[in-house]
Amino acid sequence: MVFRDSLKEPKMKADGAEYEPPPAMSGLQGHVPVKPTMSFNHDRSVPQDDWHLLAYILLANKTNMKGVDQSLLDKEVCALSFGYIGLNGKKPFIVSRSGENHDGQGSDNSLLPGLNDDMALDILARSSRSDYPNLACLNRKFRSLISSGYLYKLRRQLGVIEHWVYLACNMMPWEAFDPVRQKWMRLPRIPCDDCFTCADKESLAVGTELLVFGRELSGFAIWMYSLINHDWSRCPLMNLPRCLFGSSSLGEIAIVAGGSDKNGNVLKSAELYNSELGTWQTLPDMNFPRKLCSGFFMDGKFYVIGGMSSHTDCLTCGEEYNIETRTWRRIENMYPGINAGTFHPAMRSPPLVAVVNNQLYSADQATNQVKKYDKINNSWNVVKGLPVRADSSNGWGLAFKACGNSLLVIGAGGHGGRDDGVIVLHSWDPEDGNRDGPEWNVLAVKERAGAFVYNCAVMGC
């Protein structure tokens, strides 16, 4: 995966986050440059380059244009009459090569004049979701389309997925990171009470939602950030609220299992969350109660490993949940030895695990090594060393996540001897090789972020 440097372009405010506009596309010949500007809701300004956005999308959409020469593609773009997108008063208009002006809505009320809506929606769905806030500024029709969430459903049908990383470090607000565009975007602050802000929290990305679990003065609470609305709202509570649970998501659903209730009792119950319906469904109980465990999906099934069945007893077995049969299967010694260490088990973090291409990896807190699970032999093999130390804080403050085809390790320092206050995002593609393969790549460096990753989630949509 290739990542380019951040572009030094003017930033714009969009729905509670900062966005950088896309660069102007080269290769569009015969266009007369002008400098339109527009204000939207009194706090947004759209630079000139944003009005080349639709032509940019057409050029960037290579999925159905394999083998097409670039110069031929440029001519086809011009033939579609997207010569230039500018402003006429308050409404955007399109100037064709012949100079004829067309209202932004189009004479046939189509999304993109010259294309039927099916083709236009296909193009928009395949464009980067970083561009959606800019597209929403073009006219009401685009804004309505994007705010409806339909494009994300269409992306799911087409198999178009972009993975963004969501981080919460120290007391800073949540931030989102787009690895392809190398952009950081700050989310609005959660409108919670001080108890929720200061207490321990857990997070989970499912569908187009980021769920943050914690405690308020009144008890357990779940706050939900919507990628569509770009705002926080309360999420319905679980049927049996809990903390210290294992969880993972698969598309529009997520499963949480185990944990502790408000009285500290260790649970063996599990629940399924449907992000499209906003509902929790109680699932059959696991074979054993466990807290401080980790969950993940692999081969279409949900797994829970590690954790403690009481305040003193660790679990080395795992459990597999079959969604179709609604049954749990115990797997002996699925997580043995990795919990080894000199500290009390309750002081260690839950297992740091991630699944890439249906292969399970773990970051061993005690040995600072990445291990891969052998499904056939039910064993673990060392594949690589970690780029940062996990043993210094017993695995806490470190994120180990899957991001597309890569593994991410996010933690403090470990890059050029930097001081505290710097969070570094390291990435590695397991297909590049194992122990003797390429080193970890520094994906991004976040300055003044503190020295501790409190929460991290990767959203793919």
Image (spheres, rainbow, N blue to C red):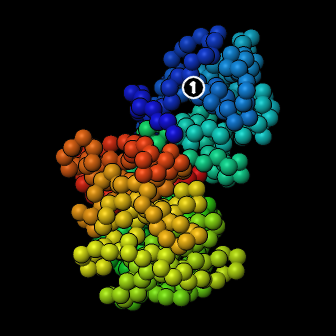
Sort mark 1 into few (<14), some (14-19) or many (20+) by Cα contacts within 10 Å. many
Q: Residue at x 28, y 57 (%)?
A: 389
Q: Position of residue 255 (x, y in %)?
A: 55, 73
Displayed quadrant of residue 253: bottom right
Q: Quick check: 231 above or below 274?
A: above
Q: Position of residue 55 (x, y in %)?
A: 64, 25
In terms of depth relative to the viewer, which is nearer, 377 or 164? 377
In terms of depth relative to the viewer, which is nearer, 62 or 176? 62
Report the side of 196 relative to 34 (left or right).
left
Q: Quick check: 60 above or below 309?
A: above
Task: Answer yes or no: is residue 174 visible.
Answer: no
The residue furthest left is 419
Q: Residue at x 40, y 79 (%)?
A: 307
Report the side of 344 relative to 105 (left or right).
left
Q: Position of residue 257 (x, y in %)?
A: 50, 78
Q: Residue at x 54, y 56 (%)?
A: 356
Location of mark 1 (residue): 51
Report the side of 436 relative to 323 (left or right).
left
Q: Quick check: 151 above or below 124?
A: below
Q: Which kind of residue does numbered mark 1 sit on? A: Trp
Q: Residue at x 43, y 43 (%)?
A: 438
Q: Position of residue 33 (x, y in %)?
A: 55, 13
* SS label for mark 1: helix
Task: Answer yes or no: is residue 161 visible.
Answer: yes
In terms of depth relative to the viewer, which is nearer, 24 or 138? 24
